[in-house]
Image (spheres, coloured by chain):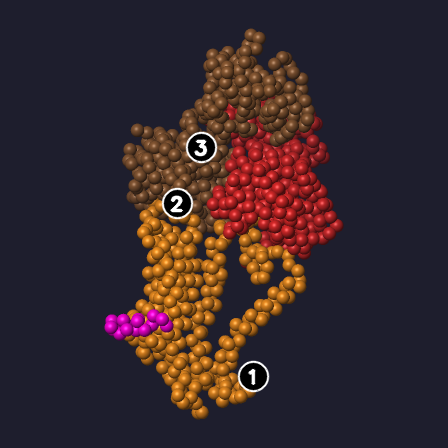
Chain colours: A brown, B red, C orange
Amino acid sequence: MAFISLVDVTKRYGATTAVDCVSLDCDRGEFLVILGPAGAGKTSILKMIAGIEDITSGEIFIDSTKINHLAPHAIDASMAFETYALYPHMTVFENLSFPLKTIRPKWSSVEIERRANEIAELLGIRNLLDRYPSELSGGQKQRVSLGRCLIKDPKVYLMDEPISHLDAKLRHEMRRQLKRIKDRLSASVIYVTHDYMESLSLADRIAVLNKGKIVQIGTPADLYQRPANTFVASLMGYPKINLVEGSIEQRKNSLVFTSADSTVVFSIPGSVKATVEKQKNNTLFAGIRPNAVVISQVPESSGWNKGRVVLNEVLGYRNIHHVKIGGSVLNVISKGKEIFDKNHEVYVRIKSDRVLFFDKAGNEIAAGGRNDDGY
Amino acid sequence: MTDIRYDGVQKDYFHKKKVLSAVRDLNLTCHQGEYLVFLGPSGCGKTTTLRLTAGLEDLTGGDIYFGQTRINHLPPADRNVAMAFENYALYPPLNIRDNITYSLKARKQNKKEIEDRLNKITKILEIEDLLHKKPKQISGGFQQLVSLARCMIKDADVYLMDEPLSHLDAEQRLRVRKELKAFHNKTGKTLIYVTHDQIEALTLADRIAVMNEGNLMQVAAPDVLYNQPQNMFVAGFIGEPPMNFIPGWIHYQNSSPYFVSAARELKIPVLPEVRINKDGLGPERSVVLGIRPESIVIDPMLNGASFKSNVVVYESLGESGIVEISCGSHNLVAITEAELQLKPGDALPFRIDTKKIIVFDPETENRI
Amino acid sequence: MGKSRQKRGQELTMYGKISGETRKKSQTVFVYAGIVLFLVFALFPIIWILLMSLKTDKDIISSVPKIFFSPTLDNYKTLIFGIKSAGSEISRPDFILYFKNSLIITTGAVLTSLAVGIPAAYALARFKFKLKEDIAFTFLSFRFAPEIAVIIPIFTIYKMLFLYNTYIGMILVYQLITLPLIIWIMRGYFEDIPVEIEQAARVDGYSWLKVFSKIALPLVKPGLASTAILSFIFAWNNFIFGLVLGAKETFPATVGTLGFISYESVLWGQMAAASMITILPEIIIAFFIQKYLVSGLSMGAIRG
């Protein structure tokens, strides 16, 4: 059995089912990320593992011990809450050292102070140790909350969106910081977020959760390159993957994908021909990532589709063009420095070897050639 | 509909004999019909400025003009503004429908018109199913959408929005952002928007007013702020991942200015194309160099003009990757492909796009 | 953070306006006029009694109320020291005893209610058990019944249990006044503590009892202070329990003041002085703890 195991765990609040028959494993020392939109049930899962929420049905094991009916203080876990949950009447130092006081054999105050300073240094809050939570900014509170979680050495760290309320600059820094210290943590980590970047960067494995159910579990590479369905594909990436509805047709001597109004057309690459051919009479979705499209003023060869820019978001280095082609609007990230203005006519080429194919229900059929270097 | 002018606006709070200035000497004109975004970290004074505009706070000093009229003492109800609060501020005992239509009913507008507007707004924001519910029955994200609906349904001269998307998840945020832009285009009314999310600001604004600790740091169109920041704060705040700053000196070699980093590992020519006030480049002048992550090019083929570095952390994030490298005593962040296999400690040569550097004065933090 | 500065600004400008909102000058005049009117209405009886306590009996009963008079501290002297001064009747030095009784009974009642009520409030706030709301409602219902309606049955029971005219008996019956107040108000304060803070302490390794003592109790301190004072005031002011269930040994000051009315005469001056002394502790306590009262009563409204 894995180090931490959830077996058919369900959580109901009255008539609402927040977690629906979820089974998850987390190995010793593994960094597992639970990814999902707001309200997916992620926080409930963490709280059940920590013992602060009842488990409606199912079982949770930590290190081969069933913890369903154990009190939280008997479970060897520490948690960083999304709402920080700092103790308002204690200083930052006291907040950080609070968990250490329950460790037996007892730590001396010298040891406690040393450890608290160490954690504070790691998170850049050393100068705040004498302050009270009400005197801290949101970002500082979040780091204190993280510090209180990391200060112990439990069997599992439970983190609930620990960096989501930081401003962009701090979020990037903290994410890298977490990645750096990840290897130092011998404990397992179960990390909950709605931000796909955090999951791609930090996770050993990602479990995607939607409306209380597990959608897909896999490594970051698995989820990005072979998403099980359109939901997972849409989660991973910014801007979202373009989903074009269409079908497979035989044209002249090649197999092509064509959108319903024949405005988006590209040929099917050999690697997936066999699988895709079986779908000839069905409606399909082609999943085209924004960076799998080349955009140009003039078509550089045949097979380019014509469209018109309806919106462009110039975000510094990454320019996103929204190109309307017939009835579809494709988001395109252009690597080059060219910016095309609104209402400009442009041509796009779909890198067909990177296209993902989904059936009508949204489930994956085939994925374009995988780059054997890993991504 | 007119311009809104902030003239020496000051807002101080007095607490235990100390003066806290939330807004310091703000001078700014918001043009009629403009989508102006106040951007800055929490506590910078942007929300206070919005509340002063609405009349929910008194000015300590300075004036605010709507056109030619000084409105300092005009009560909020008479200013014809519509406001969406970050904390929703919904009326608990009323259901969602009544919450949204409250002000319209109070002004005794035509019933049918109220229904029409209600239907339109709730459809755009995808909250039609919630109309009969009460605020505490719906999640924070939806409450925020209701608050936004309540603001947008009104027919005001100015729309004021305080972080109206902060509690929405990524997908809702994208969707509503598009709708806000469409709303602004359609109504053509002035929209003043407060946020700490620079991507939101860059996407929505006609102009962005960047604030820090009560001071206005720069106000300009998004691309101007990005390419020509006037000070280190704006340069470091706009752009994700944020700009790298390297302290060092200006060194002259054969009459050409070079930037030399503090620990002397980097020597970068300051090309004529770089827009600098040349008089500011005295020899041995201490400066700070700003380089955006995308101007650092990771070059696996070692080439004469490269610098050496070691990988600290590499993140592969789908479309692209972010790598933190250490070059001597400096750590830099660069954007790369997503497919690299970099491990901490790997040697990594890199180049710098020298046309894109920006030089700052370390003391004033202003651009040279 | 900008928000906390705004909150402070709101606290400072809380009189009259909603936060720092602009207000027309004409409105301000009306507001102040209203405040003055109310103050006059509320404070008039107390000022009258204060003046009475400083007048001689002759001045008090003069047909035209005397506004200008030479104040005297005789009434107070008589009460406290029991000195016979020329022209005044023999006072009841017993007043000091009654004041002492009030102190013992009221303090005892409040302390007992705190000791019992705080854990009860916490249980009602945090735990789930059968008939929870029914029990809570029962506590509240103690305040519904007018004391007069239940006083005769209680008198009978007390006589049977030998609780009549005892401090214990008085403290016990005073629970009907103080306990519901403490339970209901403290329950609200405990409920205002975000439950995640207590959950965090549980995860940090603390049993529920430690969480109660280290986290919940310290966080309701301001509420505690204001609730204790409120119940002190209600208990102190009570008249009927002391009157019916006590005798001379246990009469509180409220009842003791009655003694100045005899079939022959009314000792107005001393009665007034006794009244002033009686309300003195309440005024002093409220004055010193008013800081806590405001923050205590508004706690929970401002989410941190």
Q: In this view, does A240 lie above or below C276?
A: above
Residue at which label 3 appears: A210
Residue A280 on image: x %, y %: 50, 15
Q: Nearer the viewer, residue B204 or A221?
A: B204
Q: Is residue B66 left or right of residue A333?
A: right
Mark toward the start of the polypeptide (1 vs 2):
1
- Give the letter of the chain under mark 2: C
Residue type highlighted by circle 3 = Asn
- Measure the C-alpha gap from mark 3 to mark 1: 80 Å
Which residue in the structure is indicated by mark 1? C67
Share a chain, discs 1 and 2? yes
Q: From the image, which quarter does the N terminus of chain B lie in?
A: top right
Q: Distance between the residues labelled 1 and 2?
A: 64 Å
Residue range of the region highlighted in magenta in the rendering = C148-163
Same subunit: marks 3 and 1:
no
Position of residue B70 measured from the top left corner of the image (x, y, whole percent): 72, 53
Q: Which residue lies furthest to the front in this view?
A: B112
- Residue type at tag 2: Ala
Q: Is residue B143 visible?
A: no
Whether pointer 3 and pointer 2 mark residues with C-beta atoms closer than 8 Å, the reply is no
